[in-house]
Image (cartoon, grey):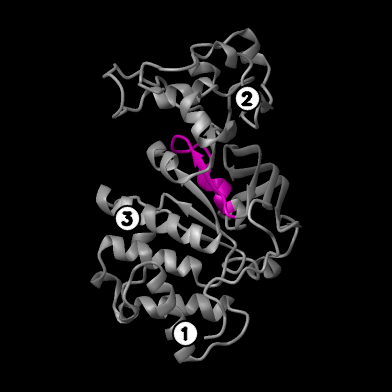
Amino acid sequence: MTTPLVEDTSGLKSGQTLLEVDNLIMRYKTKQGYVSAVEDVSFVLHKGEALGLVGESGCGKTSIALSLLRLQADNGEIMGGSIKLGGKDLVPISEEEMRTHRWNDISMVFQGAMNSWNPVYRVGDQIKEALDLHWPTRLSRAEVRERIGELFALVGLPADAQDRYPHEFSGGMRQRAVIAMALSCNPQVIIADEPTTALDVIVQDQILKELKRIQDDLDMSIIYISHDIAVIAEVTDRMAVMYAGKMVEFGDTADIFSAPRHPYAWLLLSSTPSIVGPRRQLAPLEGEPPNLLDPPTGCRFNPRCPFATDQCRVEEPPLADIGGGHMVACWNYEDVPVGITAGGVA
């Protein structure tokens, strides 16, 4: 094939803005009312950057990802904001036009993807379906085989593995094949939703290193979604901490891990064991996330926050820059301890 393995059609240089999300609002309609899944979320993704979204289950991470692809459930509705990819807003366009952007410009490694393969079709045939639907020109059978072979080589699989059925793959091989499918149509952005779920720690490390190598080699942008903050720490340049559908902290990954300023981020990191420094008692994150059918007034974290004041209970804090692009949505971020916490965050 004469087409590059991953062709850069964005015209952007590394570090320039590729994806811009502004005040995104996405809610699910239920019999009880609207579930406030994503509220006023804004961020920018640069070309060649790895961005992490971290938080507890149900905080809105996957809902953001599905909104970016316009693949939210039937009862999910984007009710405000914009999603600009290469300067083009994807929110108002038709479904037919959106299909031309999925897989070609933005693709996704779905959560639980290891079990999403159809067991009665060969893996190569399933990747062929994506190429048939989204590749700009019709490829011959020989060209498809060559293309899949190139993709498999990129993710560390033998070319002839495309002739096997999913049950003949190990968990790590299935995950690598999912990544190959996500790369199949030259996307500029890949969303990796819990890309190492259900894998043992050795294979997790291999998959993450593979994704990092691919990102560096192809100057690709990746959004990692995980509740495992160790994964986010290892592979991302910047990160966003999500809570109850809101972005509560955003900035350089190293800065947030070294000095989290939002109480939720601080407690999240304090409840995580560290393998460096002296042994310390972990600080538990008590309570449960709120009901998003009826979220708390003011700051959504205030019922669980040890630093909450009356202002927090009635007035919602904005996401504000506290210096160097470090964004925090908290009235009392200066009260959050800096340095070593009970959980060993330095």
Q: Residue at x 64, y 19 (%)?
A: 298
Give the labeled residue for mark 3.
206
Residue 236 coordinates in the image, percent (x, y) = 49, 44
Graded by Cα atoms within 10 Å as few (under 14), some (14 to 19) or many (20 or more), the crowding at tag 3 reads some
Return the mark for residue 329: 2
Q: Which residue is drawn at 40% across and 53% down?
A: 195
Q: Residue at x 73, y 48 (%)?
A: 82
Q: What stretch is highlighted in magenta?
A: 48-66
Assign the C terminus to one quadrant of the image: top left
**Magenta span contains residue 198:** no
Describe the element under mark 1 as helix, strand or loop.
helix
Describe the element under mark 2 as helix, strand or loop.
loop
Residue 167 coordinates in the image, percent (x, y) = 25, 70
> Mark 3 or mark 2: which comes first in sequence?
3
Q: Which residue is drawn at 71% across and 58% down?
A: 86
> Mark 3 or mark 1: which comes first in sequence?
1
* Amino acid beneath label 2: Ala
Residue contact between numbered discs 2 and 1, judged by CB atoms under 8 Å: no
Give the labeled residue for mark 1.
144
Whether residue 162 is situated above or below residue 236 in the rendered picture: below
Return the mark for residue 160: none
**Magenta span contains residue 62:** yes
Determine the CA span between mark 3 and mark 2: 35 Å
Whether residue 283 is situated above or below residue 217 in the rendered picture: above
Determine the CA span between mark 2 and mark 1: 48 Å
